[in-house]
Amino acid sequence: MTQYHPIKRLLIANRGEIAVRIIKTARRLGIHTIALYSDADARAMHVREADEAWHLGPAPARESYLDTGKVLRIAQQANADAIHPGYGFLSENSDFATACEQRGLRFIGPSGAAILAMGDKSGAKALMQAAGVPVLPGYHGADQHTDFLRDQASQVGFPLLIKAASGGGGKGMRRVDQLTDFDDALAAVKREASAAFGDDHVLLERYLARARHVEVQVFADTLGNAIYLGDRDCSLQRRHQKVIEEAPAPDIAPVLRRAMGEAAVAAARAITYRGAGTIEFLLCGEEFFFMEMNTRLQVEHPVTEAVTGQDLVAWQLAVAEGKPLPLTQEEVILHGHAVEARLYAEDVAAGFLPASGPIQWLHWPAGVRIDTGVSAGDAVSPYYDPMIAKLIAHAPSRSEAFASLADALAALELGPLVHNGPLLLRLCEEPEVLAMGHHTQWPIPTDTLPVPALAWPLAALWLASRERGASPWQQAAGFRLGPTRSFSAAVRIGEEARVLTLVERAGSLLWQGEQIPFELGADQIRLQQAGSWRRYPLHTLGEGDYLLQLAGRRIRFSADDQHHQLHHDHQAGDTPGILAPMHGIVVALQVEAGQPVSKGQPLLVLEAMKMEHVLKADRDGVIEALQCRQGEQVSQGALLVRFAEQHTAQEERS
């Protein structure tokens, strides 16, 4: 007779939204939860939600969430009987999983041996081939000498991918299109892999154009049962990181879908797997190839929960208690379609640079599931992944799910922190995405959209109200202007400035031949359009600087001061050199003092949020001094490289 071992005290070795997600299920099951926190997370939501919380150490992950000794010591001091690693951090650390078991702590995940088998991407390919799972051609061996790898790259052919053997989550990966670029890309991947995973071994894989990323959710218990819970399409990516995921993967024939599911289960059985895992495939036409196995709960697991009606965290805990899987393969039934969008603190216009800072206002939309680890008043830390939340829509059909998610993103209010919400909304309405015309290399549109026409009169109306003082414009119930009047306002949105003259009559705004009833509140303008009232939130960013939310867009505007410069272009000469665009660590210096450089030439490499960012010269010139050292942690806005002053011929003659 099988014995169950109930979990009573669960330590969550993670932070942010996944820690909060685990706490919710554990609380529902009556399990006492124990949170961990660094100096940066002392007031974080997961700390507030847990039954108790223990301090780990300083903010850097290496000194807190990645410190296995501290985590294990606290687990024993707190009398935990199980540890849930979430995803990221220690979730795929085989030594940590083994150490838990050795101390009598149940690790909510597979065995250390299974993690090790799949964590070595080269060895995993060999295991999959032996199990009959298709793999991509490439090099997965132990010889890591640059000359040898360069020869192997020539044999594999271009384009190819250099991937960290211990990597995951899009980190430690570069596409190389020609042999001359191979050495630099190899060095970058090795640096990134060493920093993120402590292992600089790489593998080479042939790159497939127009492939889809389709993954299968598998689950196995300790009693010999293994099943798959449908699949997910995660093809919408940027820099090999997922942006929008959906379940089930659309436009796949039933026979092919079943073959992928059965191959995924075979992969799990090949390593005597336990718990939740995901087998990632590249799908080209009717062929699929094994990429990797994630031996943990995936970020995108909520879409699978939505279409199956199951709680995958509860499944994980049940397996750890020795219970059988709640369902057999025949009992798995999918209902409808689910789509998830990852909301990140990042500046899309600046090349997806990660952002950090306070969240002063936050209003989550209704009608969708929100998985988050922040609320108004919290901050996104520069020390960790910049994910703010996941928004998940579930509907009877794919088109309805995307429409529901689009509505939610349009209604989202969050700031002043910059985020990718407007891009996510654009993707949800993109015809090629809705028609399943995208793939893993589909270029995500990041071009600047025109300012909506309605933004100008709304901004002018708001500025006019600010000029007239707090009363009566600030009345909470809204204020309508008098019988008939006109007013003007000079508005600047981005690089464009306009002077608008608006006419108000009996509480209606006359604009482009229309008479639009409006109300002005303390933090909003309401317009009556097409028979219904619509709300347009506004927020103050600073003195005379405002943010308007319009159709999911964040429109920043200000009064145009004619006595100051009309153009705010950032010219290269405005600063003495290159500034750090974010908090980070300098991992490589590629120039030296006195060296002439050309515009666009790489100067240094900055690591932030576990990713490398190459900073390039914004002008031709000569390096006067390097203001940073390799390995130094720098703050956003810090001067890193100083250029020598450029003197004109006139100055030289004088």
Image (tube, helix red, strand yellow):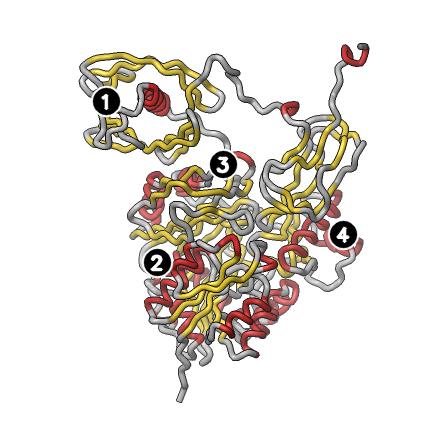
Residue at (51% x, 74% y) in the render: 76
Asked if residue 220 is positioned above or below residue 528 in the image, the reply reads below
Q: Is 464 displayed left or right of 202 in the figure? A: left
Q: Is 130 displayed left or right of 562 in the figure? A: right
Q: Quadrant of residue 491?
A: top left
Residue tagged by mark 3? 445
Q: Residues within 10 Å of mark 4 (few under 14, many from 20)?
A: some
- Viewer can see residue 262: no
Residue tagged by mark 2? 306
Which is more foreground, mark 3 or mark 4?
3
Whole-percent x and y of residue 638? 63, 37
Instruction: Give the camera-side residue of 559 and 137.
Output: 559
Asked if residue 75 is positioned above or below residue 47 in the image, the reply reads below
Q: Residues within 10 Å of mark 2 (few under 14, many from 20)?
A: many
Which is more foreground, mark 2 or mark 1?
1
Residue at (54% x, 47% y) in the render: 382
Residue tagged by mark 4? 150
Disc 3 marks which amino acid? Pro
Which is more foreground, mark 1 or mark 4?
1
Disc 2 marks which amino acid? Ala
Disc 3 to disc 4, how far (Cα)? 33 Å
Is tag 2's residue or tag 4's residue first in the polypeptide sequence? 4
Whole-percent x and y of residue 465? 31, 22
Which is more foreground, mark 2 or mark 4?
2
SS at mark 4? helix
Asked if residue 198 is positioned above or below residue 392 in the image, the reply reads below
Disc 1 marks which amino acid? Ile
Disc 2 to disc 1, how far (Cα)? 41 Å
Q: Quadrant of the C terminus?
A: top right
SS at mark 1? strand
